[in-house]
Image (spheres, rainbow, N blue to C red):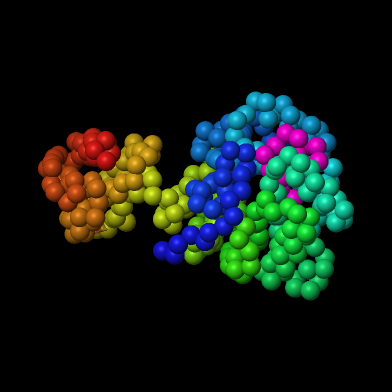
Amino acid sequence: MKPRVKTKKIYVGKIAVGGDSPISVQSMTYSKTEDVKTTVEQINRLHFAGADIVRVAVPDYADAKALKEIREQTSIPIIADIHFNYKLALIASEFVDGIRINPGNIGSRERVREVVKACQDRKLPIRIGVNAGSLEKEFENRYGATAEGMVASADYNIKYLEDLGFTDIKISMKASDVQRTVDAYRQLRSMNNYPFHLGVTEAGTKFHGTIKSAIGLGSLLLDGIGDTLRISITGELEEEIKVGRAILKDSGRVKDGINIISCPTCGRLEADLVKAVDEVERRTKDIKKSMNISVMGCVVNAIGEAKHSDVAIAYGKGKGLIMVKGEVVANLDEHNLVDRFIEEVYKFEESK
Ligand code: SF4
């Protein structure tokens, strides 16, 4: 795996983004932000699910003003997402930890300048959030809604902020298809050292959103690109965090937690492996230490996998083996296997 690209470290409240800081996972509420009670509930749900940063939409003055109360009732860093009306960014900047603007639709240069000044005064970072669907006219006319157009827009806006003496910047360049998104991030990576917020936008349902995000963000993360990410799924709040964390884990950028190796099953299977793996996943999901465990349906590949696993099960006809670091520690009736396996997993965790 390529080493992670070294970027500038900035801070969204207490969360560091870029540099050597962990890659953070963020998401967004879907409530009307002016509905303080529901918005606070959703922010807390995301926080509890493992989000590091939460973004809220601020389409109106009532939303911007509600941020004061929301701030008082939450502790996770909050980013205000602003389109079209720069004055909302000015109000929001008093209560949040960062501002996201899409320079293509925020208005004149003078308005961007005012937003920058407010953020400078309060030491807030700005995310330049380029979206293929809303490029500035000049870039759309020249390049169309392409990766090149997104890169040109991002580069132009970075330089504009730099000219104002502002460098607490992170950048996203999102398109609804994977290839354009990946191309844009890859092209821009060699042009500056600002942290990148990764995401495939409007990625769709739980199923397709997960796949598109895994391909797109996974490709970039394997290249060492990415400092924070948001998964876009039409679905429940917690799902985006779960998928984001899984992509970080499975791309190897996060070592902590359980990695489950399980076979796809075939005609040699002698047990209800699907049920067993579900149960193992549920009962080990809170383990924080880095561990590999394998749950295999027969001995064909189980012994080989067990050699690379910390704790392993190999099912056989009505019974099975449990191995720790490749050594058999139990040979049990299949009904007792999962309980003993979990016991060994927690024992191993304690010993690490
Ligand atoms: Fe089939 Fe055994 Fe391989 Fe599972 S481990 S897929 S049951 S051969």
Quadrant placement of the C terminus: top left
Q: Position of residue 164 (x, y in %)?
A: 79, 55
Residue 155 in sight? yes
Is 89 situated left or right of 193 in this image?
right
* 332 up-or-down from 264: above or below: above
Magenta span: 90-102
* 152 up-or-down from 324: above or below: below
* 193 up-or-down from 288: above or below: below
Residue 275 in sight? no
Quadrant placement of the N terminus: bottom left
Query: Which residue appears at 44% of the width and 54% of the height?
Result: 253
Query: Which residue appears at 61% of the width and 44% of the height?
Result: 11
Q: Position of residue 171 (x, y in %)?
A: 65, 56
Taking the image in four quarters, ligand 1 sits in the one at bottom left
* Magenta span includes 344: no
Q: Position of residue 30 (x, y in %)?
A: 67, 39
Q: Position of residue 98 (x, y in %)?
A: 68, 43
* Magenta span includes 101: yes
Query: Which residue appears at 82% of the width and 65% of the height?
Result: 137
